[in-house]
């Protein structure tokens, strides 16, 4: 069963953006499957993938129906070992998961299956219990929505360059050097913070180089100066993890442009979204 959990988890997580909900979806599907009559099922993996996709779409539809804070970030997942773990490689990037929130659950499922897992439209039609034409239309609609919000510039694809930039970022913040910090930020910089339903944050959304730099230095001096900061890879993107007395309380995921400027800082403070991050 463990192998199936690893195979199915990326499908559920990429649709839901929540590791907790994804684990529940996978567990429900596997429990129902192994307690039912399985005669006549020739492709066990295909059947389970289809079941998990449907379960995830249903869960996402229910979540969408409940009013929520407009500032919502996906639950982060450590992907340090993605080179050795094929299932971690299937986890969506953090920037992409944020963009995918603009899609309805079925559009999201089709986009993920086609672009993330390389399914054909015939295979997708079978999974979503639809037609090839429906699959094509859903994908076209999804791409049109995403194109409106996609970053205008290419993203950095160098771990070494990203690590150097984060070192500069930390040095500037620790030294209170606002001007240097501003120079590291894109003119289109966006800062987003998600504290969940119970934790108040200093600011949920901030834009503009000076405004974001001032906010970052203020937050560091007031809340983070005594923290242990660890560099990590979260959803295939550079990140900083902040610990107090060994307890993780903040995760910052960075979207970095090819010109080495920081486009977005996504800060997860919700304890429920941080509890599954474990670095080896």
Image (cartoon, rainbow, N blue to C red):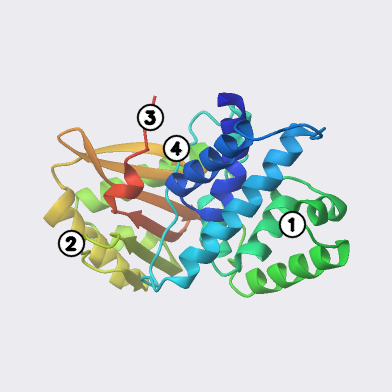
* Residue, disc 1: 128
Horizontal side of 174 relative to 37 (left or right) equals left
Q: Nearer the viewer, mark 2 or mark 4?
A: 4
Give the spatial CA distance, label 4 vs label 3: 7 Å
Element carrying mark 4: loop
Position of the N terminus, as image quadrant, is top right
| Residue 90 in the image: above or below residue 130 | above
Q: Is residue 112 left or right of residue 219?
A: right
The residue where tag 4 is placed is 78
Instruction: Say which residue appears at 70% left-offset and 33% top-offset.
Output: 37
Q: Could you tell which of marks 2 and 3 lies nearer the N-terminus? A: 2
Task: Kindly state the secondary structure of the residue where label 2 is placed.
Answer: helix
Q: Return the x and y of residue 182 as percentages of the image width and height.
A: 34, 63
Disc 1 crowd rating (10 Å Cα; few below 14, some 14-19, many 20+) is: some
Q: Earlier in the sequence, mark 4 or mark 3?
A: 4
Q: How many residues crowd around disc 3 within 10 Å: few (fewer than 14), some, or many (20 or more)?
A: few
Structural crowding at the residue carrying mark 2, measured as other residues with C-alpha within 10 Å and reported as few (<14), some (14–19) or many (≥20): some
The tag on residue 279 is: 3
Of marks 1 and 3, the one in the foreground:
1
Q: Which comes sooner in the sequence, label 1 or label 3? A: 1
Q: Nearer the viewer, residue 45 or 190?
A: 45
Q: Which residue is mark 2?
A: 218
Between marks 4 and 1 in the image, the one whose residue lies nearer the viewer: 1
N-term mark: 4 or 1 = 4
Q: Nearer the viewer, residue 42 or 276?
A: 42
Residue 237: in sight, yes or no? no
Q: Is residue 93 left or right of residue 147?
A: left
Residue 67 against residue 45 in the figure, above or below: below
Depth order, front residue of 126/215:
126
As measured in the structure, the alpha-carbon distance from the residue carrying label 1 to the one carrying label 3 is 35 Å
Note whether 184 is above or below 119 in the view shown.
below
Tell me whether the residue at label 4 lies in contact with that at label 3, contact meaning CB atoms closer than 8 angstroms: yes
């Amino acid at each position: 069963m463990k192998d199936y959990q690893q195979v199915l988890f990326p499908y559920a997580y990429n649709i839901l953006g929540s590791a907790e909900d994804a684990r529940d979806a996978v567990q429900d599907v596997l429990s129902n499957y192994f307690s039912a009559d399985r005669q006549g099922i020739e492709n066990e993996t295909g059947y389970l993938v289809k079941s998990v996709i449907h379960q995830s779409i249903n869960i996402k539809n229910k979540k969408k129906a409940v009013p929520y804070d407009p500032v919502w970030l996906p639950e982060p997942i450590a992907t340090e070992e993605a080179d050795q773990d094929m299932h971690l490689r299937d986890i969506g990037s953090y920037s992409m998961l944020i963009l995918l929130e603009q899609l309805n659950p079925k559009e999201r499922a089709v986009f993920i299956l086609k672009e993330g897992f390389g399914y054909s439209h015939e295979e997708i039609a079978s999974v979503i219990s639809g037609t090839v034409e429906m699959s094509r239309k859903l994908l076209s609609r999804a791409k049109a929505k995403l194109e409106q919000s996609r970053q205008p510039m290419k993203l950095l694809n160098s771990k070494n360059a990203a690590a150097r930039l984060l070192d500069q970022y930390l040095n500037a913040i620790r030294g209170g050097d606002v001007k240097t910090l501003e120079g590291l930020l894109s003119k289109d910089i966006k800062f987003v913070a998600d504290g969940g339903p119970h934790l108040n944050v200093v600011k949920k959304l901030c834009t503009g180089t000076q405004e974001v730099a001032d906010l970052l230095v203020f937050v560091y001096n007031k809340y983070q100066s005594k923290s242990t900061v660890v560099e990590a890879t979260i959803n295939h993107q550079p990140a900083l993890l902040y610990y107090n007395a060994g307890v993780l309380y903040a995760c910052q995921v960075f979207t970095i442009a090819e010109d080495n400027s920081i486009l977005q800082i996504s800060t997860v403070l919700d304890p429920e979204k941080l509890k599954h991050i474990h670095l080896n």
